[in-house]
Image (tube, helix red, strand yellow):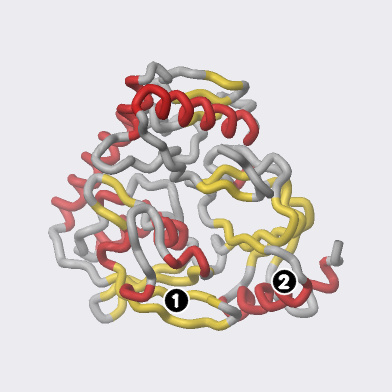
Amino acid sequence: MISITEIQKVFKGRITLNEPLARYTTFRIGGDADYFVEPVDADDVLSIVKYANKQGIPFYVMGNGSNILMSDEGIRGIVINLDTSFNYLRHESDCIISGAGVKMARFVDFCIQKNYAGVEMLAGIPASVGGALVMNAGCYGGETADHINEVKVIKNESMITLQKAECGFKYRNSDLRNTIVLEGKFSLPSGNKEELMARRKELILKRNEAQPVEIPNAGCIFKNPGDNKAAILIQECGLKGKVFGGAMVSEKHANFIVNRGNATAGDVIELVKIIRNTVHEKTGVELEMEVKLIGFEEVAI
């Protein structure tokens, strides 16, 4: 392994070796990262990316750790964490500018306090703004990309600004996967603060009643296939409460797999296989994973 001293010649931020990643994921699953770095600014991110590419070291950007399943083996390379230095929000010229590390709940509250509408339904998404943009996360009829104006990213070792049309937003995906998102600029319609706060509260209560928010999970495991709901298909196949090792299909919402306290990534993968095979055999529908696999060399699901 390359020493911290060597990396510090080009990098200003904090560096740790063999950092446990489970604590950074909402699933509470995952092995260690060889290198865990926290850049101090955008130039620092660019420096570590250039260094990693020069040394042939793979790197991965971690946001809030939701919507991912981290390998039990962790990451053989560099994990870049943007939480600390990209945790800013600004109101400029009728736009909201958010750093990639800002949690969605805080972003939504900031917008509401400035009397902006259009994102109140996203408050319950357990993601950072950067991760939500990459995934185009959404719920209750809204998506993160609905009101985005432009996105500042690092792509091919260059820092550039992409307009919305250049980001390739689609259902639970985008072309931002090939970049490191640093910042988003949103243009939002005006709204009434009290009404927006009431709507936000209503939707959070609805989410808490319908989803297993009290147990570690990564969010919805599968994308909804066409006009079907993955949760309904899984439930109708009798898989609610299905257990493999420490992982279980939620008894509250069938499109969630929960960590009962000692689940491994391997347990989750096996349960995913059971769900996909059972649903396909009984309904003919092929479920596609929404949760992304990180640190796996090759997995057949």
Q: Label 1 to label 2, Cα distance in Å?
A: 21 Å
Q: Looking at the picture, how far across and down is residue 145, in whole percent?
A: 31, 63
| Lateral position of residue 49 relative to residue 99, left or right | right
Residue at figure coordinates x 52%, y 32% from the top left: 272
Q: Position of residue 293 (x, y in %)?
A: 57, 46
180 relative to 205 in the view: left or right: right
Q: Quadrant of the C terminus?
A: top right
Q: Amino acid at mark 2?
A: Ala
The local crowd at label 2, few if under 14, some if 14 to 19, many if 20 or more residues have their Cα within 10 Å, is some
> Residue shown at 40%/68% (left/top)?
98
Mark whose residue sits in front, 1 or 2: 2
Q: Tell me if residue 18 comes above or below residue 12 in the rendering.
A: above
Mark number, residue 78: none
Q: Is residue 30 above or below residue 86?
A: above
Label 1: which residue? 152
Callout 1 crowding tier (Cα within 10 Å): few <14, some 14–19, many ≥20: many
Dot label at residue 52: 2
